[in-house]
Image: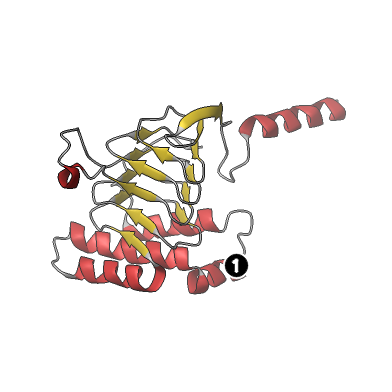
Amino acid sequence: MTESRDIRAPGMFACLKADLKLLCRGRDSFAHRVAAVLTNRGFHAIFLYRISHALWMAHIPLLPLIFTRFAQTFYAVDIAPQAKLGPGIVIVHGFGVVIGRNTRIEGDCCIFHGVTFGDRGSEWTGVQIPDGHPTVERSCMFGAGAKVLGPVTVGRNSIVGANAVVNKSLPPNSIAVGVPARVVGERPEMDENLRPIHRRETANSASEVRVS
């Protein structure tokens, strides 16, 4: 997929356009886009976050929190307005997703319900350990109930399985499962439609052989 880029660069509408494009991949008709805009609660939650983040970046008080509360109340999605989410974010089902204030997600990521990106709560436990929020590189997927905690980095094109707890950084192209999460495989590079690139190239090569 595309190379990592500065997630602060795209504007709100460019990010929303990328969010909708990834959500509708493979079914990119006008009717499907309209249906997604009107009925998809994950897209609605991201839309409210984009507004709250834009207001927060403009140093407008109170309103970012109000839009955040709308997302919490209507969609059970809690995304801090300070979080930095790049273009192309899809939230599936939505319920229980929490994204903490210093989380950075580069973009082109799919997040299922019950996923948390947060710190380790050291301020509440009294444990003196380095704490902070995670960084997620491009093109990652997080299964239902996954937790990514602390100042860790999830490398690009990785998959974190359902209910896994990530407390250490993951290299690119990882498939990680378990508590704590451990790498059990390598994910192939994907194209913009989330199809393995090497399979597509193999299919094209086979077609060329048949034609010749």
Judge by depth and name the residue closer to the eye, 162 or 37: 162
The residue located at (49%, 59%) in the rendering is 20
Residue 96 vs residue 201: left or right? left
Residue 174 vs residue 58: left or right? right
User: Residue 9, how many percent across, how many down?
Assistant: 30, 47
Dot 1 falls on a residue whose secondary structure is helix
Judge whether residue 86 can be spotted in this image: no
Render colour scheme: secondary structure
Indicate the quadrant where residue 30 lies. Answer: bottom right
| Residue pointed to by mark 1 | 32
The residue located at (51%, 73%) in the rendering is 39
Q: Mark 1 is on which residue type?
A: His
Q: Is residue 94 above or below residue 159?
A: below
Judge by depth and name the residue closer to the eye, 80 or 114: 114
Q: Is residue 53 above or below residue 197?
A: below
Residue 24 vs residue 101: left or right? right
Quick one: label 1, few (<14), some, or many (20+) residues within 10 Å?
few
Q: Quadrant of the C terminus?
A: top right
Residue 169 vs residue 207: left or right? left
User: Residue 54, how many percent across, how many down?
Assistant: 25, 60
User: Residue 43, how many percent across, how many down?
Assistant: 45, 64
The residue located at (19%, 33%) in the rendering is 129
Indicate the quadrant where residue 205 lies. Answer: top right
